[in-house]
Image (cartoon, rainbow, N blue to C red):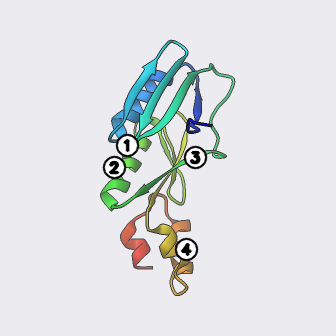
């Protein structure tokens, strides 16, 4: 196999709209190609296909995309952008965007903080009680 695997996202005839929306949120993103059925786009170098498949299928939390952030400013940007205009906050750093796609907006250091033998349980308790994750709260746990 010479080409990388990439996801195909099924939209109810809003694939181009969704691709434009995501490209406006993520840096280094672009529409690669489009036709009435399919739009190919990149978010931070990751290729995606958006398919105008119709109303038969919807996204569920069984699939989510993880955004590992270096700073609270990054967490705030992605969280606020993806929950805007009809998105929904969930718990533990999870959210759904206005198209119903689930995202996890987390600090890149979360795994390290949770694996600390002295504070890992306290960090997990902060995560479980939070919607949007706040790096300072996790570091102070």
Disc 4 to disc 1: CB gap under 8 Å: no
Residue pointed to by mark 4 = 125
Is there any visible trace of residue 58 in the rendered image? yes
What is the residue that sits farthest to the top in this orientation? Answer: 36
Quick one: which residue is furthest to the bottom in this view?
Answer: 118
Whether residue 98 is visible here, answered yes or no, is: no
Point out the frontmost of discs 4 and 2: 2
- Secondary structure beneath disc 3? strand
- Circle 3 packing at 10 Å, graded few (<14), some (14-19), many (20+), is some
Name the residue beneath numbered marker 1.
81
Q: Earlier in the sequence, mark 4 or mark 1?
A: 1
Task: Identify the residue position indicated by label 3 in the image.
Answer: 64
Above or below, 117 against 62 in this view is below
Residue 103 in picture, x, y percent from top left:
52, 47
Which is nearer the eye, 21 or 134?
Answer: 21
* Residue highlighted by disc 2: 77
Q: Position of residue 55 (x, y in %)?
A: 64, 21
* Residue at the image point whose x is 46% and y is 18% from the top: 34
User: Rounded to the nearest whole Å, what is the CA distance between mark 4 and mark 1?
Assistant: 26 Å
User: Which one is closest to the eye, mark 3 or mark 4?
Assistant: 3
As measured in the structure, the alpha-carbon distance from the residue carrying label 3 to the one carrying label 4 is 22 Å
Find residue 102 and report its image quarter.
top right
Q: Nearer the viewer, residue 3 or 88?
A: 3
Decide: is 62 above or below 72. above
Q: From the viewer's perspective, is the residue at label 1 or at label 3 nearer?
A: 3
Q: Earlier in the sequence, mark 3 or mark 4?
A: 3
Q: CA distance from mark 4 to mark 2?
A: 24 Å
15 displayed left or right of 29: right
Residue in the picture at 67% in, 28% down: 57
Q: Quadrant of the N terminus?
A: top right
Label 2 secondary element: helix
């Amino acid at each position: 196999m010479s080409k990388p695997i990439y996801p195909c996202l099924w939209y109810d005839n809003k694939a181009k709209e969704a691709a434009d929306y995501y490209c406006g949120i993520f840096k280094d993103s672009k529409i690669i190609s489009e036709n009435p059925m399919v739009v190919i786009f990149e978010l931070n170098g990751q290729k995606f296909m958006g398919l105008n498949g119709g109303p038969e299928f919807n996204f569920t939390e069984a699939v989510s995309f993880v955004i590992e952030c270096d700073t609270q400013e990054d967490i705030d940007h992605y969280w606020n952008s993806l929950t805007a205009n009809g998105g929904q906050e969930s718990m533990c750093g999870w959210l759904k965007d206005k198209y119903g796609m689930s995202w996890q907006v987390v600090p890149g250091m979360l795994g390290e903080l949770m694996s600390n033998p002295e504070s890992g349980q306290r960090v997990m308790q902060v995560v479980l009680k939070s919607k949007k994750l706040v790096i300072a709260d996790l570091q102070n746990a």
